[in-house]
Amino acid sequence: MPKRNDTLTAAKDKKSDEFYTQYEDIQREINAYLEYNPDTFRDKTILLPCDDPEWSNFTRFFAQNFEMLGLKKLISTSYSIESKQAHETVQLSIFDYLTDFEKNSPQYDETISPKRGKIFTITRRNKKIDINDLQWRYLEGDGDFRSEEVTRLRDEADIIVTNPPFSLFREFLPWILTADKQFLVIGNQNAITYKEIFPYVLQNRIWLGMRFNQRVNGKNMTFAVPESYPSSGTEIFTDASGKRYISVAGTGWFTNLEHGRRHQPLSLMTMADNIKFSMHSDIRETGYLHYDNYDAIEVPYTDAIPSDYSGVIGVPITFLKFYCPEQFELLGATESEGKGFSNGLWDDASGVSQPLVNGVRKYKRLFIRKKDG
Ligand SMILES: C[S@@+](CC[C@H](N)C(=O)[O-])C[C@H]1O[C@@H](n2cnc3c(N)ncnc32)[C@H](O)[C@@H]1O
């Protein structure tokens, strides 16, 4: 019998990672990269890890658009149902995961099916490719992205695209970046200041994709979920056919693929004009306040950043979506996890990482400075 502490740890380790990306969200995002550079995916090997290739919209999108994107190879892998369940709070049914496609395939094996991940591949040949060209087999292991087997596939790939388990995001992005790969993955904005992620943001090796924390048709990013997905704290709804979805605020795409908005500078007013005309009454009434403990001004709204201030500026973390590296230099983040990545902006040894204005703490701030020219 497990000891009480083991049981508690196991329960704490369990997460609700089963939510599935919609086709239109993938299509809309990919289009933004194609608009910037139609050859973004040309001659590339794409790996879709953490997927369920028989019904993942990532696999469907890339397989259906293999020719249009000019791909060299598509690889999609899944995580075994037994390993999923071992880390999941949501009750999963093997029957939901065992598709007719797998059952009717000659390689179907009912004993290994629940234990192993699967790999689907399409490779460019001298004929038109479509979804029927998918080849599949069981992986040797359970399909954990950290396994040697999937890590070898990462090494073979040029670009990694997926919606990974949010609970493993701290491991997932470094898994990609230590191998110096390109990527496009979905995550939550809390991840920006993770100590495993923020150093890459500072080095301009991770930035936000086209859609981030943005409502489309009145909804935050929306994912399909299993029947038993917990409904507390999230916006859950059901469509006409009874399928369940959640809308999650603060989610969006992280990437290191170029897209147009990243290079569009914000159009900003001077400090004097902001104080006269800003739509924010506090800026009109009190102007710009200086932090008590940092040599920087506090600007609580991205659209109130003064165009003519050359010192350090503290802005809410939501600024990152509008960050144009030609316009601003990114200097640091204030949350405790960002400590140590401040480029000397504040004294980490002091243990103070939260900026104060007239004694009041300001949370989740990024520090930026206007670039010359
Ligand atoms: C947020 S869901 C997204 C699924 C799919 N990528 C999509 O967008 O529709 C993350 C998936 O990763 C799987 N997963 C969890 N831990 C994993 C691991 N260590 N390695 C690979 N996949 C994992 C989960 O079972 C889950 O299906």
Image (spheres, rainbow, N blue to C red):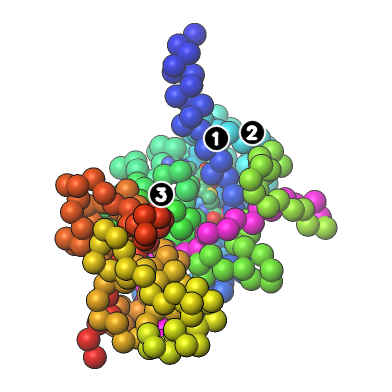
Determine which residue is flagged by label 1.
88
What range of the chain is rendered magenta?
A: 241-268
Q: Determine the CA span between mark 2 and mark 3.
A: 22 Å
The residue furthest top is 1
- Mark 3 belongs to which amino acid? Phe
- Name which residue lies at 45% across and 24% down: 9
**Magenta stretch holds residue 120:** no
SS at badge 3? helix
Q: Nearer the viewer, residue 150 or 282?
A: 282
Image quarter hosting the C terminus: bottom left
Which image quadrant for residue 327? bottom left
Q: 160 or 332, which lies in front?
A: 332
Q: Which residue is mark 3?
A: 169
Is 84 placed above or below 343 here?
above
Residue denoted by label 2: 91
Q: How many other residues sit within 10 Å of disc 1, few (<14), some (14-19) or many (≥20)? A: some
Measured along the vertical axis of the image, is residue 147 above or below residue 25?
A: above
Cβ atoms at labels 1 and 2 below 8 Å apart: yes
Question: Percent from the top left, x then y, of residue 348?
Answer: 20, 50
Tags 3 and 1 in contact by the CB under 8 Å rule? Answer: no
Q: Does the beta carbon at disc 1 come under 8 Å from ligand 1? A: yes
Give how far across and how far down residue 264 sits, in percent: 40, 85
Mark 1 residue type: Glu
Residue 32, position as x, y percentages in the image? 49, 79
Is 360 situated above or below 171? below
Tell me which corner region of the image, top left, top right, bottom left or bottom right, holds residue 325: bottom left
